[in-house]
């Protein structure tokens, strides 16, 4: 796994990755410190796998899903595409036990993760 660029280590993560469902497909964006997207949309495939989550699941502490089925985050595909586009999920977020390998669910079909450039 690539590491964050040395100029960004130790600083707050200024970029944010967003993975969401639109028209039945997962899409990845990287949002810059300003309002613009610097990556995306990147297609991550169909949102055709579902799970009934528990509030105790990693990454699901911010919302109450009340037993509804939600699409399964394609985390591995998202991380792979982040790396291919020159970003990595922030290391401190990956170590956070309340997150799912750095990702947090903020809506039924929307996950976010702080990230940093690799080069």
Image (cartoon, rainbow, N blue to C red):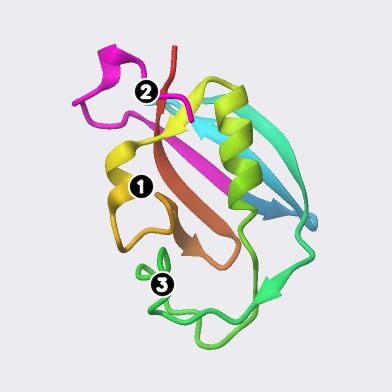
The verdict on residue 7 being magenta is yes
The residue at which mark 1 appears reads as 94
Query: Which range is magenta?
Result: 1-19
Of residues 69 and 56, the one nearer the viewer is: 56
In the rendered view of the protein, which quadrant contains the C terminus?
top left
The verdict on residue 17 being magenta is yes
**Residue lying at 41% horizontally and 72% vertically, measured from the top left:** 63
Classify 2 as above or below 28: above
Element marked by disc 3? loop
Classify mark 2: residues with Cα within 10 Å, few (<14), some (14-19) or many (20+): many
The image position of residue 1, as x and y in percent, is 48, 30
Classify 80 as above or below 108: above
Classify 57 as above or below 105: below
Q: CA distance from mark 1 to mark 3?
A: 19 Å
Element marked by disc 1? helix
Which labelled disc corresponds to residue 4? 2
The residue at which mark 3 appears reads as 63
């Amino acid at each position: 796994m690539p590491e964050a660029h040395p100029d960004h280590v130790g600083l707050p993560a200024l970029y944010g990755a967003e993975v969401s469902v639109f028209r039945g497909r997962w899409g990845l964006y990287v949002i810059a410190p300003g309002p613009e997207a610097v990556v995306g949309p990147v297609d991550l495939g169909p949102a055709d796998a579902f799970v009934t989550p528990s509030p105790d699941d990693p990454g699901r502490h911010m919302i109450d899903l009340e037993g509804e089925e939600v699409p399964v985050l394609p985390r591995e595909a998202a991380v792979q595409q982040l790396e291919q586009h020159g970003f990595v999920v922030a290391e401190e977020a990956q170590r956070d036990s309340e997150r799912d390998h750095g990702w947090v669910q903020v809506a039924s079909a929307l996950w976010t993760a702080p990230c940093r450039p690799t080069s």
